[in-house]
Image: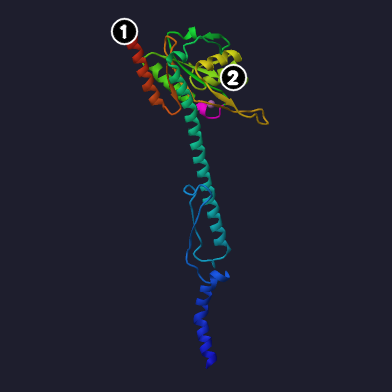
Amino acid sequence: MKGVIFQRLNSKCMPLALCLGRNVTGIHCYPRMPVQRTLFTRNTSLLTRVLLRTPKTEIRGAATEKKGNKNVAWAVALALTGVCGIAFYVMDSMDQKRKIGKIKQNIESSGNIEIGGKPWTLTDHNGVERTDKDFLGQWVLFYFGFSHCPDVCPEELDKLAKVVEAFNERSDLPNIQPLFVTIDPDRDTPKVIKKYCKEFTPTLLGLTGTPEQLESIRKTYRIFFSTGPVDENGDYLIDHAIISYLVKPDGSFADYYPKRVNQKGMIQQIEIQMKKYEKEKQKQ
Ligand code: NI
């Protein structure tokens, strides 16, 4: 009798006892309730919150566990990619803001007289010597960059080309002459620049020069850049401010447009400058 009672008790209580003891002993032999865990990677708590749900049962076998692990790996990889992307974007915009702030400060502290408006001599992509005098009577948009720039310069030159084309198509407003001045004369030979400029718009004229000539015009437009380390292929990047400068037909500086000013904004602002210039001319 005693044996029968013990057997019955045992059959009813053992599962419960094993369930309760699971957390202590680590035995997993009964279905487990879903447990929600939150992982935080160091220093990026909000950005990398990854919710991991353990499998509903752990008796489904290795296949379920493998699938779960794969999902976890994907979630972590996706979260990390997101974090890296956001961090890169924030750092890049902060760096650009700093550079533009420096230029803005220079422009504001110097006044219009100090920016541009000084004589310069360079060589165009056809090998012809050019000076500031050649462009008097025209609206000019200057851009300083380099043809090996992987993405920013092509994007900016593409925007600049579209802006220029928009003006050149309009009969009520003057044309604009776009000029690309290299900050990398060692690689940007006239031949290289000619091919590069053609990719954007036929009117874009590339300019290079001797180190002294280039330094002189860079100083005039307050252009800052720093050359990065050279890799095993002899390749290197140049960190530079992304700004287009608008020059009036009398050769004086009119305005500047950083990367954040889009195509539409640039067209609007240039149109204002052109109308302002016409008004001033009529007054004289
Ligand atoms: Ni660039």
Per the image, label 2 sits on a secondary structure element best described as helix
Q: Is residue 242 above or below residue 77?
A: above
Looking at the picture, tell me which residue is in the foreground, 171 or 19.
19
Looking at the rendered structure, the kind of residue marked 1 is: Lys
Label 2 with label 1: CB-CB less than 8 Å: no
Examine the image and state in which quarter residue 187 appears: top right
Q: State left or right for residue 138 relative to residue 205.
A: left
Residue 100, horizontal then vertical, whole percent: 47, 26
Specify the label residue 192 is tagged with.
Answer: 2
Give the residue at x 49% y 29%: 98
Give the residue at x 51% y 62%: 55
Which residue occupies the extreme front position in the image? Answer: 109
Q: Which residue is mark 1?
A: 283
Mark 1 packing: few (<14 Cα in 10 Å), some, or many (20+)?
few
Residue 131 in the magenta stretch? The answer is no
Q: Which residues are magenta?
A: 149-154
Looking at the picture, tell me which residue is in the foreground, 246 or 46.
46
Residue 171 makes an appearance in the image: no
Cα distance in 3D space between marks 2 and 1 = 45 Å
Judge: label 1 CB < 8 Å from ligand 1: no
Q: Earlier in the sequence, mark 2 or mark 1?
A: 2
Give the residue at x 43% y 20%: 108
Give the residue at x 60% y 17%: 189
